[in-house]
Amino acid sequence: MTTRAKVKVTILCEDLLAATVVRRLLIARGFAKRNIYVHDLPSGAGAGSQFVHDAYPTAVRAVRRGHVAASLVVHTDADNRSVQERHADLATALAAAAEPARAPNEPIALIVPKWEIDTWVHHARGNAVVESTAYTSAKIHSEEAAAADDVIGVLLPLWEGTAVAPAHLPSIATAVGELGRLP
């Protein structure tokens, strides 16, 4: 059994599509299904980004204390903000909860697609995309398994180092760098 297969991972994310993408990506990378826990998803009332922002300090605290998992993967969409602003929002949430800032060696990865993960799905399906444009699609969310497989087909080779991130989607490169924080 590989070391990765023994690692417990908690996923904190905004929606079911993101949870499906992250969970399947971790499994494809060698993490064991039984060791992956998906934090409760938002109820649908209110913004998913606010839900993640509010739950983030508690999830980080649990990882640091070893109560829930050894690693944490957080997904939040950048929406009309930048990826860096979302990272800063999460850092602010930690500070407000009197939690130390995320250390460079902590296995806490922040996955922040510009606008929504739908942008990555459109790219993975061969469509021309620009990160400054929203590509939201109810159809993508209704076919989450296929959409997740499409995104994993792009992300996994990047994470494994066998492909290069597309220059026009810097949020993907940032996400892959973040995934490198995991064991």
Image (tube, rainbow, N blue to C red):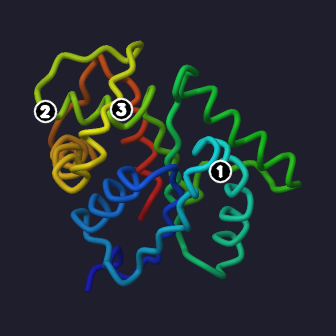
Tell me which residue sits at (50%, 36%) in the image. Answer: 77
Q: Position of residue 94 (x, y in %)?
A: 77, 50
Query: In the drawing, does residue 66 fall left or right of residue 181?
Result: right
- Amino acid found under the numbered disc labelled 3: Ala
Observer-side mark, 2 or 3, equals 2
Q: Circle 3 is placed at which residue position?
A: 173
Q: Upstream in the sequence, badge 1 or badge 3? A: 1
Q: Amino acid at mark 1?
A: Phe
Q: Label 1 vs label 2: CA separation?
A: 29 Å
- Where, quadrant-wise, is the C terminus in this rendering? bottom left
Q: Is residue 90 above or below residue 183?
A: above
Find out whether the residues at labels 2 and 3 contact each other: C-beta distance under 8 Å.
no
Check if mark 1's residue and mark 3's residue have beta carbons within 8 Å.
no
Q: Residue at x 47, y 69 (%)?
A: 38
Residue 121, by quadrant, is top left
In front here: 116 or 142? 142
Q: How many marks?
A: 3
Q: Which residue is mark 1?
A: 51
| Residue 70: % across, % down | 54, 73
| Residue for badge 2 | 125
What is the spatial separation of the Cα atoms under label 2 and label 3, in whole angstroms? 18 Å
The picture quadrant where one finds residue 98 is: bottom right
Q: Residues within 10 Å of mark 3 (few under 14, many from 20)?
A: some
Q: Is tag 1's residue or tag 2's residue first in the polypeptide sequence?
A: 1
Q: Quadrant of the N terminus?
A: bottom left
**57 up-or-down from 95: above or below:** below
Q: Depth check: 65 or 40 in front?
A: 40
| Left or right placement of residue 120 versus residue 86 in this view | left
**Residue type at numbered disc 2:** Arg
- Image location of residue 150, percent across then percent down: 16, 44
